[in-house]
Image: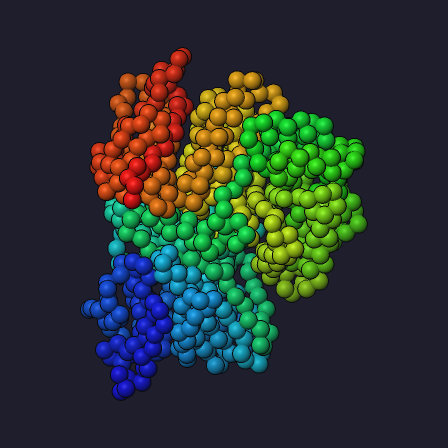
Amino acid sequence: MADTGVQPGSVDGIVRRARAGGLAAWVIRLRSTAIVLHLDGRGLLHLGYWGADGGSWNADDYLVDALPDRETAPHFLEGRPLAYPAYGDPSYREPCLVVVQPDGERELALSFTADRLVKHAGRPMLELELRDPRAGVRLMHELLLYGELDLLVWTVHVANYGERPLTLERVLSGSLPLPAGRYDCWMLRGRWGGEFQLERQELGHGAFVIGSRRGISSAEAHPWLAIAPRGETAEHTGRVWFASLAWSGNWTAMVELERGETLAASVGLQPFDFAWHLEPGERFSAPALVLGHAVDGLGGAARRLHDLERTVALPAAHRSVVRPVLYNSWEATYFDVRADQQIALARRAAELGVELFVVDDGWFGARDHDRAGLGDWRVNRRKFPRGLRPLIDEVHRLGMLFGIWVEAEMVNPDSDLFRAHPDWAYLPPSREPLLSRNQLVLNFARADVRAAILDQLHALLTEDGRIDFLKWDHNRPWLHVGWPEHPDRGREAWVRHVLGLYELLQTLRAEFPELLIETCSSGGARADLGMLALTDQAWVSDNTDAADRLPIQYGYSHAHSPSTMVNWVTDVPNHQTGRVSPLEFRFHVAMQGVLGIGGNISRWSEEEVQQAQRLVADYKRIRTIVQLGEQYWLLPPPPVGPCAVQYVSPDRRAVVLLLYQVRGGVGAGVPRVRLMGLDPARRYRRERDGAESTGAALMAAGLPVRFEPTQGWHPAIDYRSALQVWHAIDAR
Ligand code: DGJ
C-alpha cells in the first residue's frame, strides 16, 4: 500500500484502502448492505456501489469492469456515479450544491482533502471533506452508520472558510446514483383527507420530481421514497433503495434518468425560494437523510425504518414504551367545548379504558369558530369559568393523563396577539395578506416571536395543574414568507422557521421531559422524520372513516413506526364520508397503531360502551406487539375485498393478525394469507379457540381470511374484521 499514498484505516464497519490504481476507496458494511465510495483522478467522490453486502472489504471486488476514468477526456463525467454533484462539474446532473460568490461566480471545483474514520456517540462515522480554495467552500459529508439497523444517516455541511461572504442557493442532503436499468419510484402521495397513498411511478427518461413548497413537508408528498428495479420488487421481495428525509419544511426529491440510462435520486431542501447567506467562518448544515437498501421489498425497508424510530430517532423519553389509549374531543364537540361537558366525556372515556384525555381546539381565547383566537393561548373563562384545573384534576382523579391542543405557529387577525403585534406574522410588504382557514403564519424565524409563544405555552403547562400531552397542530400552508428585519435574507425564513420550531420543541421537551407531544397538520401534513425526532406520535389524517383510513395507515406505516400512528374510532355515519361501518371494524382498523377514540361517547349506547370496553381491553393485550413488534402487510388494502396485516413480537413468540373485509365481494372465494416472520420450529396456538400449528406450516399454508358468522351479517358483507392472537406454546 505504501506506494499508493493511501494509508489503510478502519473503524467498525468502515475500511479505507487504495484501489488497484492507487486511488483511495472506502467500503462501508452494514448488517446486509455494502457501500463503496471512491475518488477519481480529480479528487471527486464517486458512490460506486450501494447494495447487498458482497462479503468483501475490497472496493475493487464491487467494481469489476466499472467504467474507468477517461484518460483522453478526464473531465468527462456524464453517467458517472458522482456522490454529490455540484454546480460546475461536467456531470450535467441536477447539482446538489450551488454556491454564489460575491463576484457572481458559481463554478465550484471541489476536490477531496481529508477523511476521518471516527466514533460519534459510540457509532462509526466516516467524514469526508472536499474543498474549493478559490471559492472558500468546504464541503463535509458525515456518514453515520447504524449497522445493526442496516441504515446510514448522511449529513452534509457547507462551510465558508474564505474571506468573502457566500450565498448558498442549493444544498441538498444527498444523492444516490444507481446503475443503468429500469426502475420504479415508490412514494407517499396524497391530499387532505387522503394522505400517505403508496403509489408507484415508472421512471422513464427525464426527471421525476416530488416535494413541497408549502412550508410544511405536506400531505401532497411525504419526504420518503423508494426506488426499485421494475418488476422485481414487491411488498416482501426484491431490491429496494429507500430514503427518508428528517425535515419538516420545503423539500424535494428529484429522480433523473440521464446519460447512459443511469439514474440518480437527489433529496433535500427545496431549492425553490431558498437562499442562505454564509459569512466567513459560518457553516450551514443540511437536514439528515436516512438511506437504506433492502432485499426484502418495501416491507423490509419499512421494518428497518420502524427500528430506527423506536431505537434511535424518536425522543428518548417515550421511544420504547407503548403509547396510552387516548380520547380526543374534536369530532364530539368541535369548537363548542365546555368544562362540564368535557368532564362528562372524561368520565365516560375512563369507563371505556382510555388512559389519556385530550381536549382539542376551542378551549382558548375567543375561539368559538375558526375565525378568531389563534395566538391567545389563555383559557376561555366563559367556557371554563374556573380555568382548566377542575377538568385536569378530574381527569387525573379518573386515572388518566390530560392533554390539550395548540396551534402555536399560527395567528388569527382577530386575536389579541395580532392586534398587539401584526408584524409577527408573515405579511406581504405592500398587499393584503391571503388568509387560509382565516389565519396567518407567525414568523418563527424570529427569536422574539418564539420566546413570546414559549412564554404562553409555559404558562399553559404550569398554571392549572399538570398537562401531560400536547397536540401540536398546523393548519395552513405558508405564503408571504420573508424576514422584514433582514429584507436581503428573507428567503432564509423558510428554513429558519423550521429550525426555530425545532428549537422551541427542544426547549419544551427539556423543561417538561415527561410531556408527550403529537404532531398534526390538518391531519398528516407534517408527520415526517424531522417532527418525529421531537414528537412522540402523529395524527395521520382528518379522515376518520375506517375504510378510507386503511390505505392511509398502510402508506404511513411504510415510512414510520406503528407506535407513532394515532387512529381514532369515531361515530357513524362518519363525519367525512357519511359511511357506516360496524364499531368492531372501526376499532380493528384503529388498532393498527396507537388506539384513540374520537366519537361523542356521551351518546354511545350501553351496548356500544360494553363492546368498546371489550375492544379497548383486547387492544391493551396486543398493543406491545403492534407498536413495538415487526409489521407485515399480508394483503394490502383494496378498494373492495380482503386485507390483512400481521405483527410479531421481537422474540417471535406472539403473533397478532388483523383481518378485514373492506367491502363485500358476494360469492368471492376466501383467500389464504401466509404468515410471516414466525419461528418455523415453534408450535403456535390461537387464543380464541386453541387451534394449533407450527410456525413453518403457518408460513407455508397460511390461514383463510374468514370471519365469524354473526347474526344479521353474512360473512361476505361489507366491513367485517377479525383479530387473531397466536402464542408460541413450546417451553423453550
Ligand atoms: C386539524 C386537525 O387535524 C384536527 O384533528 C383538529 O385538531 C382540528 N385541526 C382543530 O382545528
Q: Is residue 719 visible?
A: yes
Q: Position of residue 552 (x, y in %)?
A: 44, 37
Q: Is residue 497 visible?
A: no
The total number of labels drawn is: 0
| Quadrant location, the N terminus | bottom left
Identity of the residue drawn at 41% across and 40% down: 625
- Seen in the image, is 380 located left or right of residue 125? right
Identity of the residue drawn at 61% across and 53% down: 513
Does 45 sit above or below residue 353? below
> Which residue extends farthest front?
731
| Quadrant location, the C terminus | top left
Quarter of the view holding residue 35: bottom left
Identity of the residue drawn at 67% across and 63% down: 487
Q: Position of residue 124 (x, y in %)?
A: 40, 68
Q: Position of residue 205 (x, y in %)?
A: 32, 53
Identity of the residue drawn at 48% across and 35% down: 620
Q: Position of residue 524 (x, y in %)?
A: 52, 42
Does 443 sit above or below residue 85? above
Quarter of the view holding residue 329: top right
Does 707 sit above or below residue 248? above
Choose between 174 and 468: the one closer to the eye: 468
Choose between 206 and 158: the one closer to the eye: 158
> Which residue extends farthest left?
65
Choose between 686 and 348: the one closer to the eye: 686
Does 223 sit above or below residue 176? above
